[in-house]
Amino acid sequence: MRKRIKITSFILSAITVAALGSMTAYANNYPDSPYNFTFNTASNQTAFRPKQDDSSSYMRCEYAQRAYTAHVISRSTQTGANVDCSYGHTYQFNTGSKHFMINSVWETGYREGAIYATRNFGYSYNANGQWSPDSIPE
């Protein structure tokens, strides 16, 4: 009898593991997109991308001639105007820096996010890297 229970338990465990292993994992909109900022005016922003959950946005600066400051925005569905969704958090970027950027895009009912960046110096310079409206923590 005990042997039969052990065999049945083993078979049920194997079936459970096989079923879980075959499920497709659907994650948020985390693939990175490139950005290229030319700060010949005071500010730049990324294109808007769909945001699929309440995770942080992500930005990694691969190159910056000088530092810049950035925060997360969305846009009004009524007016199309940018809406600050940063909870007051701003992030400074230099070559090699990366940040998981706290935001309220999803929580406030918006479904698109972007990153708005301002130059820290009064002259023209460039910066580029990768970003995503959603993230998977490291």
Image (cartoon, grey):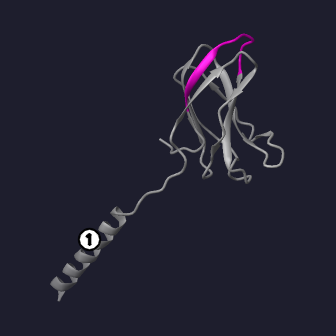
Q: Residue furthest bottom?
A: 1
Q: Which residue is mark 1?
A: 14
Report the quarter where the N terminus lies.
Answer: bottom left
Q: Is residue 23 rendered to the left or right of residue 71?
A: left
Q: Amino acid at mark 1?
A: Ala
From the viewer's side, name the closer residue of 74 and 96. 74
Residue ID at (71%, 15%): 40
Q: Is residue 108 above or below residue 13?
A: above
Percent across and percent down for residue 43 are: 73, 24
Callout 1 crowding tier (Cα within 10 Å): few <14, some 14–19, many ≥20: few
Q: Is residue 109 above or below residue 86?
A: below
Residue ID at (20%, 79%): 6
Residue ID at (44%, 57%): 25
Highlighted range, magenta? 119-130
- Confirm whether the magenta stretch covers residue 27: no
Percent across and percent down for residue 82 are: 78, 38
Q: Residue furthest top?
A: 123
Q: Quadrant of residue 16?
A: bottom left
